[in-house]
Image: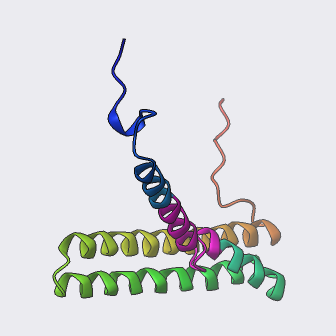
Amino acid sequence: MEEIPEGFSPKADPRKTVTLLELALSINLLLGLFNMVPAFPLDGGRVFRSILWGATRRLDRATHIAALVGQGFGFLMIGLGLVRLVLGDPAGGVWTIFIGWFLSQAAGAARRDRQLGGVDADLQQHGQGSATPRPAPVA
């Protein structure tokens, strides 16, 4: 018969189990709160964009504003990471800089993608066809 690890056995100290569950709960709550920060492309940024879209009735404008806020938040995270590096927390500083860089890049990509989508829509609306090239007919 296989031996059960000490932490998972019925004889384990229930305080260890409670401590583990509390840790998992706090990590999930922090992750959920971070995800709801109104910085696009996080979920909170998408909620923020939908509020802006309802107010402006223009998805391109709402996306542009939400993406700028997302990029700003990313740069703020990079700055916080630099402060953490200076204060002697190299692992936390590098990690915070990486998250900030990722957020700023993703927000900028979403903004550029929406701008290019708007160009395609303008071309189609004005009878210019699609910005996507069509395959040449085969003879």
- Left or right, residue 122 beside residue 17: right
| Residue 113 vertical position relative to residue 135 in the rendered view, above or below | below
Snapshot quadrant of residue 47:
bottom right
Judge by depth and name the residue closer to the eye, 7 or 94: 7
| Residue 136 vertical position relative to residue 133 in the rendered view, above or below | above
Quadrant containing the C terminus in the rendered view: top right
Quadrant containing the N terminus in the rendered view: top left
Snapshot quadrant of residue 77:
bottom left
Q: How far across and how far down the image is residue 4, in percent?
A: 37, 26
Judge by depth and name the residue closer to the eye, 134 or 36: 36
Q: How far across and how far down the image is residue 58, in percent?
A: 79, 81
Query: Does the rendering let one see residue 83?
Result: yes
Residue 27 located within the stretch drawn in magenta: yes
Query: Does the rendering let one see residue 41?
Result: no
Q: How far across and how far down the image is residue 110, in percent?
A: 57, 69
User: Residue at 57% across / 78% down in the picture?
Assistant: 37
